[in-house]
Image: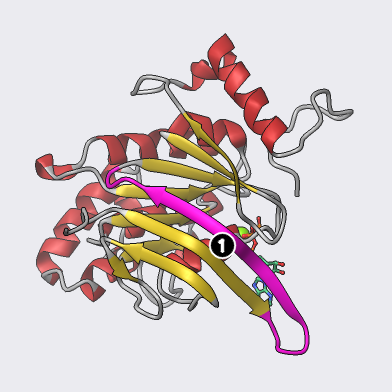
Amino acid sequence: MSAAPGSVEVHDLRVQRGSRSRPVVALEGLDLSVASGSFVAIVGPSGCGKSTLLRVLAGLLVPDGGSAHVAGRSVAGRPGSCAWMPQRDALLPWRSVLDNAVLAALVGGEDPKQARRRALELLDRFGLGEVAPRWPAELSGGMRQRVAVLRTFLDPAPVLLLDEPFGALDALTRQELQGWLASVWEDAADGAPRRTVLLVTHDVEEALLLADRVVVLSAAPGRVVADHRVAHQRPRSPDLVGEPAFVADRAELLAALGVPRHPPVSGDGGRAPH
Ligand SMILES: Nc1ncnc2c1ncn2[C@@H]1O[C@H](COP(=O)(O)OP(=O)(O)OP(=O)(O)O)[C@@H](O)[C@H]1O
Ligand SMILES: [Mg+2]
């Protein structure tokens, strides 16, 4: 039976990092099944293996045990099945914003003219049309992250792996970018099927605002300790955070993360522990 193009299946995954003399088991016994076209957020304490999981799916790390499949094919040592946005934006400083944006599309084999046209359209939509000819170093942190998200979207791969795409941004820019991400994902271009998104975040509210499902990983070695379906209708407004159902979801996820119910210091926006 052929699997859907954006389906992700991870079974009994084990990944060891570090050196032979000082090994670190980053992931152990991790199972995850993601339906094509769904939006899944992954949360978990710092160091629990979230970035490691995305690297495995990106085909950049070969697992030490278990399996990882995209569209029914093993990704072990086989990059290219997923578009990956690493934890740091990784824009190439010697390429303009537009040339950075089209990079993944060109590597994916898209016609350069068409890639540039699509990139310019998206840059406009992301409020970056004017900076297309500029260098990454001339942009603010928020602009750089927008370019990096956009580049990932322009990659034709059916699965998008976003590793804390909005980390280290101020609350307003973060909210703005969350809105962009949701709308770009919801209105798939030209009636094409929606792509699968795996979004790593430390922010439980962000996870609940964007995802269909929130998967919680344990402290290292990471494995799935909670898998929460998010029922809120789309499109979702940021005002949702005040609604009782949202507050209840947030409390449930924070409990799964082991965050105390009444932490002594508040005002962190529902962040997972670091
Ligand atoms: N290149 C590396 N060499 C050695 N150990 C590593 C390497 N990268 C990650 N690790 C270890 O693997 C474990 C998982 O790291 P990973 O980066 O996947 O965590 P994470 O959940 O993404 O953390 P964070 O939320 O801080 O980004 C950690 O113990 C980390 O120290
Ligand atoms: Mg990480």
How far across and down, in percent of the image, does residue 133 sit? Answer: 31, 63
- Residue type, mark 1 in image: Ser
Q: Residue furthest right?
A: 264
Residue that numbered label 1 is attached to: 51
**x and y percent of residue 61 in the render?**
49, 76
Residue 66 left/right relative to 2 = right
15 sits to left or right of 260:
left
- Compare residues 59 and 148 and report the one nearer the observer: 59
Q: Where residue 22 sits: x, y (%)?
A: 77, 83
From which residue to which does the magenta span run?
Answer: 18-37
Structural crowding at the residue carrying mark 1, measured as other residues with C-alpha within 10 Å and reported as few (<14), some (14–19) or many (≥20): many
Is 211 placed left or right of 156 in the picture? right
Q: Residue at x 25, y 75 (%)?
A: 107
* Quadrant of res 213: top left
**Per the image, is 23 magenta?**
yes
Q: Quadrant of residue 252?
A: top right
Residue 30 seen in this snapshot: yes
Is the shortest distance between ligand 2 and the CB of mark 1 under 8 Å? yes
Please determine whether, in this image, residue 246 is positioned above or below residue 210: above
Q: Nearer the viewer, residue 252 or 109?
A: 252
